[in-house]
Amino acid sequence: MFSKIKNYISKNTGILIRLDDIAENMNWDLMHKSEVLFDKYNIKPVLGVIPNNKDEELLSQPKKNNFWDLVRRWQEKGWNISMHGHTHVYDSDTKKNDYFKYGGRSEFCGHPLEVQIDRIEKGLKKFSEEKIKIKSFFAPNHTYDSNTFIALKKSGIHQVIDGYGLMPYKENEISFIPQLFYKLYSFPFGIHVTQIHLNYWKQKDFESFENFIKKNRNNFITYEEVIKKVNNNFIFKILNFLIRGVLRIKRLF
């Protein structure tokens, strides 16, 4: 009995690395160091690529003219390239009416369906021109509304790397891979995404990340492995419901 429980926990535990704000202008020093680290430990992260970056803060970072060559190379290595918004420019206020009650400003939440479809399809067009395959999406600042999910489905995207829960789940024809924290955590049970913002890191942050990778080197999983674990069984539903309730209440204040 104990061995069965141990095996069940092992099969349903893992860490998926998600890097946000990957664009032509970014902290390339830490990006290169991260790539060396990922290759050393055979980690295949998710890269949230901004297809048409116009975020002024990000544009102040160093630029790589061969950016799309690098993105193609990363995808060829088995890294998942996810669409991270369109321009990464926030032009609406959620007033905490966004789907996950995250709050703050947004690129998508609050806009009419037609506007959201237009932004998603323009982003997909850029990826297509660069010969990058896109299966998944996550919005800047974690902010969505019902129109965002309708727009994604109309554009052929049914996988979102965001949400609350300890296990991937399906809701309204979209598979969600929960992303709970922006700090480095390792749970004894559950599949969770660790969100990384290299553009805001210093060298000491990277060193902490390197130690985290070394410590948990046997616990990392790939996007393809995670998406196969999407399951709405009773146990997972209860766990996800409890986590969602706690975090939604917390983020209201």
Image (spheres, helix red, strand yellow):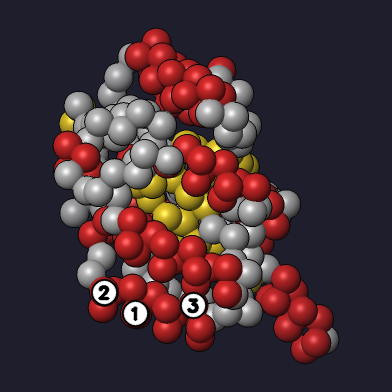
Measured from the top left, where is residue 42 in percent x and y?
Answer: 63, 69
The Cα–Cα distance between marks 2 and 1, rounded to whole angstroms, is 6 Å
Which secondary structure, mark 2? Answer: helix
Disc on the earlier residue, 3 or 1:
1
In the rendered image, the vertical position of residue 1 relative to residue 115, given as above or below? below
In the rendered image, the vertical position of residue 102 relative to residue 147, given as above or below? below
Measured from the top left, where is residue 38 in percent x and y?
Answer: 53, 68
* Residue under label 2: 203
User: Closest to the observer: 37 or 228?
Assistant: 37
Q: Amino acid at mark 3?
A: Ile
Relative placement, left or right, of 208 versus 2 is left
* Residue under label 1: 207
Disc on the earlier residue, 2 or 3:
2
In the rendered image, the vertical position of residue 208 relative to residue 118, given as above or below? below
Measured from the top left, where is residue 4 in percent x and y?
Answer: 81, 81
Asked whether the residues under the numbered discs 3 and 1 touch, taking CB atoms below 8 Å apart as contact, a structural biologist would say no
- Residue at 61 percent across and 34 percent down: it is 133
User: Closest to the observer: 207 or 238?
Assistant: 207
Considering every residue shown, the one lying at the far bottom of the view is: 2
Measured from the top left, where is residue 162 in percent x and y?
Answer: 46, 47
Which secondary structure, mark 1? Answer: helix
- Residue at 29 percent across and 44 percent down: it is 63
Residue 116, image quadrant: top left
Q: Amino acid at mark 1?
A: Glu
Relative placement, left or right, of 200 versus 108 is left
User: Closest to the observer: 71 or 182?
Assistant: 71
The answer to whether any part of residue 238 appears in the image is no
Asked whether the residues under the numbered discs 2 and 1 touch, taking CB atoms below 8 Å apart as contact, a structural biologist would say yes
Residue 210, image quadrant: bottom left
* Residue under label 3: 213
